[in-house]
């Protein structure tokens, strides 16, 4: 049994559990005629929602009054899907961030306002599993609301998912997508080619750049590649020089040193694209 602290609506109640922590209970009619101070059986709830971070919990409670009762329940189905497909949610901000994002996306779509996502292809290549789950969520949204969200929303939802299971900041993930997008443009211009966004080569290139960024972020370097670097510099000067330009842009953007071995690996990758 838990004590009622606040009734938000007929289906959502904020309670205090025996350890004096706030717990949000969600269930059809669970808040009907309930008063502050009454006890309620937590087992009667369809969903029990606990946020460990007090700041996130406060933000979530501020958001709840602006949401329809059935939408709150729907969002918990969405979050349950994410956990079942991706594993435990680490970054609790998704409860506020994704809930707010989807509610606003539905509102925008109903008003005929669509936002273009220029990094959609890069997001799909960078976060392939999250993208697949996001597609399922967009299908759920269509079934729930009758609204068809634009394809760009899949990419945005995918970033929220990746942020939630890796505990990485959304602004950092957006920076990654923009950086990859910019580097791809540099490669196309430098090699005078047009990459097929649906090809396996494009997917491999994006993944290669992603791992290079992550290695720089974590400071994990490989063994010295000076001998191979000299060979590549002579054999493939175009790709070698372009690889150095890319590494310099990467360093400037993420504010971390990028190991010289990345130039070697990138040169080989670029030459493969040309071949």
Image: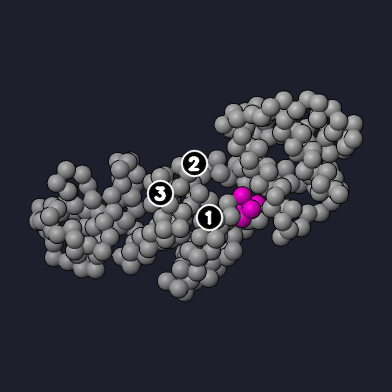
Mark found first going from the N terminus, 1 or 2: 1
Q: Position of residue 210 (x, y in %)?
A: 64, 43
Q: Quadrant of the N terminus?
A: bottom left
Q: Is residue 267 above or below residue 159?
A: above
Query: Which residue is at 22% across, 62% downward?
Result: 45
Disc 1: which residue:
130
The quarter holding residue 35 reads: bottom left
Q: Position of residue 173 (x, y in %)?
A: 56, 44
Name the main secondary structure of what is drawn in magenta.
helix
Disc 3: which residue:
89
- The CA span between labels 1 and 2 is 14 Å
- The CA span between labels 1 and 3 is 13 Å
Q: In the picture provided, is 65 more to the left or to the right than 132?
A: left
Mark found first going from the N terminus, 3 or 2: 3
Question: What is the number of callouts on the image?
Answer: 3
Question: Does the image show residue 8?
Answer: no
Q: Position of residue 270 (x, y in %)?
A: 80, 43
Q: Is residue 228 above or below residue 138?
A: above
Q: Position of residue 150 (x, y in %)?
A: 57, 65
Name of the residue lying farthest toward the left: 38
Mark found first going from the N terminus, 1 or 3: 3
User: Label for residue 260?
Assistant: none
Binning the other alpha carbons within 10 Å of mark 1 as few (below 14), some (14 to 19) or many (20 upward) gives many
User: Label for residue 168?
Assistant: 2
Binning the other alpha carbons within 10 Å of mark 3 as few (below 14), some (14 to 19) or many (20 upward) gives many
The quarter holding residue 114 reads: bottom right
Q: Is residue 236 above or below residue 121?
A: above
Q: In the picture provided, is 203 more to the left or to the right than 67?
A: right
* Magenta residues (range): 122-126
Query: Which residue is at 10% across, 52% downward?
Result: 37
Binning the other alpha carbons within 10 Å of mark 2 as few (below 14), some (14 to 19) or many (20 upward) gives some
């Amino acid at each position: 049994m838990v004590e009622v602290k606040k009734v938000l609506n007929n289906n959502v109640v904020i309670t205090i559990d025996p350890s004096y922590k706030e717990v949000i209970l969600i269930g059809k009619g669970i808040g009907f005629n309930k008063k502050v101070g009454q006890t309620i059986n937590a087992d009667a709830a369809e969903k029990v929602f606990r946020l460990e971070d007090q700041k996130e919990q406060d933000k979530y409670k501020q958001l709840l009054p602006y949401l329809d009762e059935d939408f709150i329940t729907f969002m918990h189905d969405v979050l349950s899907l994410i956990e079942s497909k991706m594993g435990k949610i680490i970054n609790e901000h998704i409860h506020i961030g994704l809930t707010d994002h989807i509610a606003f996306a539905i509102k925008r779509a109903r008003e005929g306002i669509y936002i273009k996502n220029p990094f959609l292809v890069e997001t799909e290549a960078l976060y392939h599993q999250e993208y697949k789950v996001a597609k399922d969520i967009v299908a759920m949204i269509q079934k729930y609301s009758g609204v068809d969200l634009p394809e760009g929303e899949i990419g945005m939802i995918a970033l929220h998912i990746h942020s939630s299971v890796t505990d990485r900041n959304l602004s950092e993930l957006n920076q990654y997508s923009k950086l990859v997008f910019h580097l791809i443009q540099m490669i196309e211009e430098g090699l005078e080619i047009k990459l097929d966004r649906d090809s396996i080569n494009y997917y491999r290139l994006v993944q290669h750049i992603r791992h290079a960024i992550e290695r720089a972020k974590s400071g994990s370097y490989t063994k010295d590649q000076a001998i191979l670097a000299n060979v590549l510099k002579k054999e493939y000067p175009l790709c070698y020089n372009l690889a150095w330009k890319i590494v310099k842009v990467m360093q400037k953007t993420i504010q971390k040193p990028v190991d010289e071995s990345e130039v070697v690996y990138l040169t080989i990758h670029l030459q493969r694209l040309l071949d």
